[in-house]
Every structure is written in structure tokens, then in C-alpha cells.
Image (tube, rainbow, N blue to C red):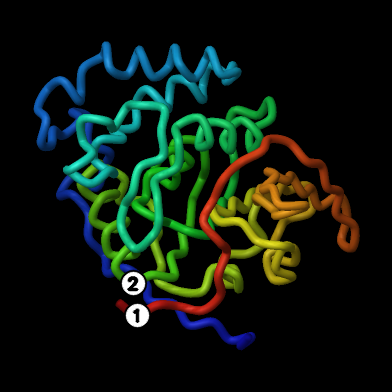
Amino acid sequence: MSDKPVYRPAPVLMPQSGRRIDKIPERMGGPSLTSESARARLVETLRGLGISQPSVLAVMARVPRHLFVDEAFASRAYEEAALPIGYKQTISRPFTVARYAEHALQGRSRLGRVLEVGAGCGYQAAVFSEFCAGIVSIERIEALYAKARANLLHAGYPQVQVLHGDGLLGYPPQAPFDVIIVAAAGLDVPEALLKQLKVGGRLIVPLETQGQQVLTLIDRVSENHWKRETRDLVKFVPLLQGVRDF
């Protein structure tokens, strides 16, 4: 693996106001997808599954998930389910995204810089952008990189920096990160990500062990010491190195 990652940054594109879009845009499916009742049902489902942090529940209700799913699945946007986004990838279950957010915050109201490995369709980056000072999201599949950028701009999140590159190499220009989130499962954590985690920061990654994927929290407690603890059973696509230019 090269130690000189090459990234393709997004060109500067943002709404004329340069701010979040106040009114949630509609998509195929019409107002039913943006209704308060659809979001309220999702929040109640998440609460029933154990998501309890009020700020996380509020953000899960606010982020327009229907703008991140393919139109063929728009009617299912607020179901508690993972949905295909093409290229053998999925948008994560709302519960999984909310659980990542709770683990990252752990009692804090705000985060500093966040690195996401695996932008996918951009949904998780949108959620985390509500809590952090800045987020960089790296996607190895070029078509999904383009999709994530377009989705985030359309949904009103121009502040999210999306890059096309190998996420296993991290992003040294903005390291160290307060939080690193990995949206794919591997056998172990790439050394580059451990080194780019701030002392006092947290890395959240699904790791494969004994035929299962377990969400693992890794806290950097000092310059040369990391502490691990395992949490939820999860299901993610494989964590792969390199880039795919199509």
C-alpha cells in the first residue's frame, strides 16, 4: 500500500446563500416523505431500540434521509432498514447511524474534526455534520463519491468535504481527528487511522471476529496506547483498500 495517498477533492459548489437549506426539499413521493409524522415514527422506532440521547434523536428526525436513498426506494426512506445504493453497497439502518453518533458523542454535545471512511450516499456524513466542527468523508468508489457529493449539496450540507480516495490511508492534511468512523468491516484497524486519531479521541469501526461483525470502540488514551471495547453486533460491507475509478 502506498504511503502517499492521492485524493480527488470536490470542486467548490454550494447554494448561493452558502448556508443550510431551511426547507427540506422534496423528491419523488411528495410531501409524505417530508411529513413530521414520518420522522416522528422513525424517532419512536429508534427510541424503542435503545437510542436515548435527545440531540441524536432530534438530528435523526431532521436529516432528510429520502434525499439520500435511490428513488426506487424513496417510499421506504424512513423505515428502520438498510437499503441498496448500487455498487453492492447500502445506506445503513437509521439505528446504526444513530448508534454511531451516540458512541461518538458519549455525553458531549459537540465534536471537533471527524473523518468518515466510506461516504456511501452521504447520509451518515450529513448526520455527523450536525454535531461536529468539520467532517471529511472519503469514498473509494468514484460513482458513489459523485453521488454523495450531489446528495449532500441537494440536501443542504455543502460544508461536508467529500473526497475520492483510499480511506484506509486516512487523511493526513487534517489529522489528528477527534472522531474517526468506519462504515465497512475488516479484520483489523489500519495503522494509518490509529495514528491519525487525536489523543483523547475515538475510532468507531466494525471488526470481524469468529464469523461475526462487532462494533468496536477504540480510544486513544496516550501517544502510544489505545483502549478497545466491543459493543453491538452489526452487518457491513467489507473494508477494502485502493480506489475504483468508475
Between 35 and 213, the residue placed more toward the observer is 213
Question: Quick check: 239 above or below 131?
Answer: below
Whether residues under marks 2 and 1 lie with C-beta atoms below 8 angstroms apart, the answer is yes
The three-letter code of the residue at mark 1 reads: Asp
Residue at x 59%, y 51% (from the top left corner) = 181
Residue 142: image tag:
2
Distance from disc 2 to disc 1, alpha carbons, whole Å, reads: 5 Å
Residue 35: image quadrant is: top left
Residue at x 58%, y 54% (from the top left corner) = 182
Residue 80: image quadrant is: top left
Does 143 sit left or right of 99 as displayed?
A: left
Secondary structure at numbered mark 2: helix
Question: Quick check: 107 above or below 185?
Answer: above
Does 161 sit left or right of 22 as displayed?
A: right
What residue occupies the far front of the structure in this picture?
A: 211
Q: Which residue is mark 1?
A: 245
Residue at x 59%, y 28% (from the top left corner) = 109
The three-letter code of the residue at mark 2 reads: Glu
The N terminus is located in which quarter?
bottom right
Does 67 sit left or right of 164 as displayed?
A: left
Q: Position of residue 63 (x, y in %)?
A: 34, 32
Question: Around disc 2, counting alpha carbons within 10 Å, would you say few (fewer than 14), some (14 to 19), or many (20 or more)?
Answer: some
Residue 78: image tag:
none
Secondary structure at numbered mark 1: loop
Does 67 sit left or right of 239 as displayed?
A: left
